[in-house]
Image (cartoon, helix red, strand yellow):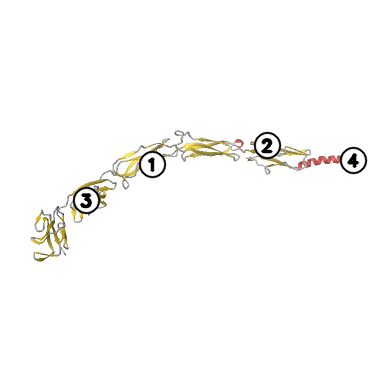
Amino acid sequence: MSPARLLCVVLAAAAAWVVAPDVASAAQFPTPSCNGGGCSDGWYRSNVTVSWSFDPGYTGVNGCDATTITEDTGGATLTCTVTYGTGGTFNSVTVRKDSSPPSVNASFARDPDSNGWYTSPVGVSFTGDGGPSGISSCTSGTYGGPDGGDVAVTGSCTDGAGNTGSTTERIKYDASAPTVTPAPERAPDTDGWYNHPVKVAFSGQDGGSGVAECTAPVTYAGPDGNPAKIVGQCRDAVGHLSAPVAFELRYDHTKPTRPVVKARRTSGGIAVSWKAPTDAVRAEVRRAPGGKGKQPAVVFAGKGVRVVDHKARAPSRYWYEVRVYDQAGNAASRTLAVQPSTGILLPVGGAVVKKAPLVRWVPVAKARFYNVQLWRGREKLLTTWPSETQFRLGETWKFGGRTQRLGNGKYQVYVWPAFGTLAKPQYGKLVGRADFVVKRR
């Protein structure tokens, strides 16, 4: 080989020995990419595809293909090595993946209190299995309502990767006593008052374990009260007893005092009056016999202490029942008989009149006419024989051969029944006498 050629070979070899180290030293470490972005040293919750980037001019690569991590792992390390000539460089990345939510368990602070039911607030805590990333936190708390036979108690745990799992436990919870409703067997008898015994039942409602028992029905029969009270309670299936619930009622079973009754005949009928007891609020007056048939007739109903029965006939016998009622509808009564009327009906004895009065009297059986006489002191001023049972006096009239005048003063009127004829009258017993006073000023 010529010296010149030998020199070229030596120089070429020297050049190769120098270039190779320069290329290796200039190459950068391989750069990893996770799902197309930078790689984090935190936790991934989904599949992670790791790819690599590196400088060109390499002579070899190892472990630098794209790799997808699908399984949960506490740390999968991938290494990419790139060779440049006789030298090389490498880089590693560790990927942690946890995509599964933790399993969660509930733990109650105590067992159920009664018959499988919790009857007061109960603490509950939750624990979990967090997989590769472990448990970061769990919830806890206290369940205190609402009541129910299948209530949900839910809690959760979160792992280090941010996955959250939850669980729901079903429990029976009843911390409330039943509510109680009283129910009387009937409405009040009169105007909001009960006036004879009434039965009251008690029923309950419970949103939890249900009602087990309530106070048995109670019959209230006294004493009188405003209000009177009946108390009842209910108990639920886990032993809660309700507060006493009172049913208030107005109760009066006592009759009022019997009224004091008076009756008298007047020119307009029969006047009935009564003295009512202090607790009476209304009265009713019945007359027997009634107008038609044998049933009594109601001649008064309402508030008051007096009535004039204008439909009562003068000669007849009547019975008047005065019945008084208290506010609860209790009644007391008294009956008074009014005898058939006799004598002069008008003017009423002792009447003071301003003009000539009408004289009216009770008819006498079989009388054909009557003798009416008017006197002032010992002086007779008039005698007449009407056929009817009434006669109106005049302001002036003729008698005893002179004109008579009805002036101020005291007068007496007499009536006798007459039988036979006017020519030959036969007189019976005196029907009656009435004294009256004329007073014009």
Which-is-in-front pick, marks 3 and 1? 3
Q: Nearer the viewer, residue 68 or 272?
A: 272
To which residue does mark 1 refer?
181
Residue corresponding to mark 2:
77
Numbered mark located on residue 274 in the image: 3
Asked whether the viewer can see residue 201, the reply is yes
Q: Which of marks 3 and 4 is nearer the N terminus?
A: 4
Label 2 environment density (alpha carbons within 10 Å; few <14, some 14–19, many ≥20):
few
As drawn, the label of residue 302 is: none
Amino acid carrying label 4: it is Arg
Q: Where is residue 169 in the image (x, y as percent from the top left)?
A: 52, 36
Please tell me whether mark 2 or mark 3 is closer to you in this view. 3
Residue 280 % position (x, y): 26, 49
- Label 2's element? strand
Secondary structure beneath dot 1 equals strand
Residue hosting label 4: 5
